[in-house]
């Protein structure tokens, strides 16, 4: 079991297994956040606490909404937008 938190501890994530690989995305948003992603089906991830979301505004149809703690600002995970789920299936990054 992996347990992760934001810096202040208000957002907590749990997954039962390690990801098969870690992706170091090089888009501007991920690079600025220092994000490294493991991919899971949403049913495999438990998220507790309130997050805020952000979708890139420079994309006509952004594929992901990045979530972060509204108090400390730590990037916690992403969810796919409905249009991305329709195209690719449903995964979640954490």
Image (spheres, rainbow, N blue to C red):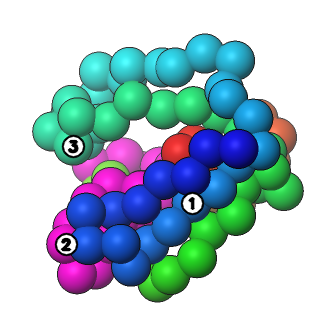
> Is residue 73 within the magenta segment?
yes
> Is residue 1 within the magenta segment?
no
Residue under label 3, please give it.
33
Residue 71, quarter of picture: bottom left
Looking at the rendered structure, which numbered label has been put on residue 13? 1
Residue 54 higher or lower than 88, as above or below:
below
Q: Residues within 10 Å of mark 1 (few under 14, many from 20)?
A: some
Which of the two discs, 1 and 3, sits closer to the camera?
A: 1
Please indicate, yes or no, whether residue 54 appears anywhere in the rendered image. Answer: no
Q: Residue 15 in the image: state x and y as whole percent.
A: 70, 48
Image-based side of 50 in relation to 6, left or right: right
Residue under label 2, please give it.
72
Write the start and end of the magenta stretch as one range.
58-76
CB of mark 1 within 8 Å of CB of mark 2?
no
Q: Residue 73 in the image: state x and y as whole percent.
A: 21, 67
Q: Secondary structure at mark 3?
A: helix
């Amino acid at each position: 079991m992996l347990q992760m938190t934001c810096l202040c501890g208000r957002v907590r994530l749990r997954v039962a297994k390690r990801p098969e690989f870690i992706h170091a995305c090089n888009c501007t948003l991920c690079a600025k956040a220092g994000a490294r992603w493991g991919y899971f089906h949403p049913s495999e991830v438990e998220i507790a606490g309130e997050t805020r979301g952000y979708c890139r505004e420079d994309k006509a149809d952004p594929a992901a909404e990045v979530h972060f703690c509204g108090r400390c600002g730590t990037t916690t995970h992403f969810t796919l937008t409905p249009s991305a789920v329709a195209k690719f299936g449903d995964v979640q990054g954490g």
